[in-house]
């Protein structure tokens, strides 16, 4: 009997190993087929071709049709992916992403596209490049439904039980959460969309635009001064930072509903009642200030600008990039954002901070070429790599051997990260935004247009830094050697 049991056990183990081997072989066959398909796509294309291709994918995400149930023509799409815990309590979907219109995404995409257009005038006559000014104009035209006086809201208005509210329109959301998501205007959406309008005036001069002083008045009004810090900021030992707050609303206003589950008809309210300080939000405000200063040629003075700049320098020197973005769960987003701030004319980071930033970027690259989103839940390898390369190409010594090799390895990874769906290639969108601190990393926003716009820009800057690689085969850059 024992002998029979022993034989049965041996046979079972042998069959399990055989099944495992078959699954491994099958997976290997799938990966080999994907690689072959990707190589066929890359064959005959240069890096410049891939840069234009990424730009085409970004522009292709802009809504064209008039009868889209989610978006207005001109908006770029946003997908919200929930995780099991929030989904179980009625926030978002696990098995399929929700579509969600927000001017914040459209503004973010426009800011990347417009900067690319302005920085590479030699390509303005290229077919895909020539589409950017009109795409920017079409996107900015959709901002009207997010306007609230001179500032902006993250969401468009929705008439609910006879009352206009500002909460998700199409996201799966249990009624218990309707109130807490009825949010006030915010400094992030305001700075991103207002900056986009400044870019539009540059690309389309006939569409004049001047930033209202009321915008800066509101930004100055809501700063982190003499107040009790929100729990997330307290955990990061950040209180009374003098920086800019996210929400353009008085957290102590007695008219604001403080009961989490009160109806959305009770009015807008700051999520979970406390305002917060986010490093990327502050960076976006700095970008708006310097862009406005550049557009007007006036010495604009905004209270809080120096303090926000000092705060960001301190956060980088203290290695807080992974967590300082409450709504931005990516360790290298701050490096990307500050490079954009400097492009707008604000040399905010000190020499020591830039050195620390570059050292941190170099440390986070893996042996496989991608950059690690260390300290955050999601890997988001493609977007993290694009963020890192953008900052490295801006702040780094491009003739330094280690810097150049890091960038080449990054391009190698991007070439090998192309994915095919129905014979159409694109890069994964990854997560670029998240919900409030309590739901950080649990409810995630994705934008194909945003990620592809940055990839296009990065490839163009790589080619600019190393012009001898302009016509380098994309297939060669996807080769096995790193």
Image (spheres, rainbow, N blue to C red):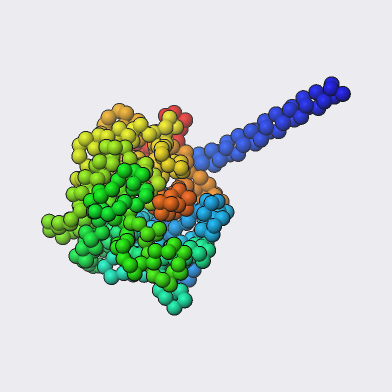
The quarter in which the N terminus is drawn is: top right
Q: Position of residue 265 (x, y in %)?
A: 43, 72
To which quarter of the image does residue 248 belong?
bottom left
Q: Is residue 352 above or below residue 222?
A: above
**Looking at the image, which residue is at 36% across and 44% down?**
235
Q: Nearer the viewer, residue 167 or 476?
A: 167
Whether residue 476 is visible: no
The quarter in which the C terminus is drawn is: top left
Q: Position of residue 413 (x, y in %)?
A: 43, 37
Q: In the image, 234: left or right of 171?
A: left
Whether residue 450 is visible: yes
Q: Nearer the viewer, residue 281 or 16?
A: 281
**Looking at the image, which residue is at 38% across and 34% down?**
364
To which quarter of the image does residue 198 belong?
bottom left
Q: Is residue 177 above or below residue 129?
A: below
Q: Position of residue 435 (x, y in %)?
A: 42, 54
**Looking at the image, which residue is at 44% across and 74% down?**
159
Q: Nearer the viewer, residue 209 or 114?
A: 209
In the orientation shown, which residue stands out farthest toward the right?
1
Q: Is residue 382 above or below residue 257?
A: above
**Looking at the image, which residue is at 33% across and 36% down?**
361
Q: Position of residue 279 (x, y in %)?
A: 30, 48
In the orientation shown, which residue stands out farthest toward the top?
3
Q: How many marks?
A: 0
């Amino acid at each position: 009997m024992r002998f029979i049991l022993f034989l049965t056990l041996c046979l079972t183990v042998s069959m399990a190993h055989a099944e495992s081997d078959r699954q491994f072989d099958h997976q290997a066959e799938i990966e080999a087929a994907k690689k072959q398909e990707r190589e066929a796509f890359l064959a005959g294309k240069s890096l410049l071709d891939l840069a234009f291709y990424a730009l085409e994918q970004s522009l292709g995400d802009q809504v064209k049709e008039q009868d889209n149930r989610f978006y207005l023509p001109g908006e770029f799409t946003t997908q919200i992916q929930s995780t099991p815990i929030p989904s179980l309590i009625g926030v978002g979907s696990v098995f399929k992403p929700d579509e969600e219109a927000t001017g914040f995404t459209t503004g973010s995409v426009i800011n990347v596209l417009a900067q690319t257009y302005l920085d590479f005038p030699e390509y303005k006559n290229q077919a895909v490049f020539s589409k950017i000014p009109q795409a920017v104009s079409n996107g900015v035209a959709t901002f009207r439904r997010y306007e609230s006086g001179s500032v902006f809201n993250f969401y468009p208005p929705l008439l609910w039980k006879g009352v206009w509210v500002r909460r998700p329109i199409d996201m799966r959301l249990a009624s218990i959460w309707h109130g807490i998501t009825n949010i006030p205007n915010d400094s992030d959406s305001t700075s991103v969309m207002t900056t986009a309008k400044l870019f539009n005036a540059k690309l389309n001069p006939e569409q004049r635009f001047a930033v209202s002083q009321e915008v800066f008045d509101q930004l100055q009004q809501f700063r982190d001064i003499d107040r009790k810090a929100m729990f997330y900021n307290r955990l990061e030992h950040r209180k009374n930072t003098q920086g800019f707050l996210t929400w353009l609303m008085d957290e102590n206003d007695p008219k604001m509903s403080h009961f989490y589950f009160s109806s959305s008809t009770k009015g807008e309210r700051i999520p979970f009642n406390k305002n917060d300080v986010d490093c990327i939000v502050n960076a976006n405000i700095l970008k708006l200030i310097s862009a406005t200063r550049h557009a007007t040629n006036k010495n604009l003075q905004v209270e809080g600008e120096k303090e926000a700049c000092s705060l960001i320098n301190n956060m980088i020197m203290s290695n807080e990039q992974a967590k300082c973005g409450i709504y931005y769960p990516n360790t290298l987003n701050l490096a990307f954002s500050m490079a954009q701030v400097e492009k707008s004319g604000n040399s905010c980071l000190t020499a020591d901070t830039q050195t620390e930033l570059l050292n941190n970027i170099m440390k986070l690259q893996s042996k496989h070429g991608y950059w690690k989103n260390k300290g955050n839940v999601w890997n988001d390898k493609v977007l993290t790599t694009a963020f890192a390369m953008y900052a490295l190409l801006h702040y780094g010594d491009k003739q330094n051997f280690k810097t150049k090799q890091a960038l080449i390895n990054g391009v190698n990874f991007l070439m090998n990260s192309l994915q095919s769906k129905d014979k159409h290639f694109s890069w994964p969108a990854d997560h670029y935004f998240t919900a409030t601190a309590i739901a950080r990393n649990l409810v995630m926003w994705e934008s194909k247009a945003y990620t592809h716009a940055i990839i296009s820009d990065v490839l163009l800057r790589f080619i600019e830094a190393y012009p001898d690689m302009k016509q380098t085969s994309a297939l060669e850059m996807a080769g096995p050697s790193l």
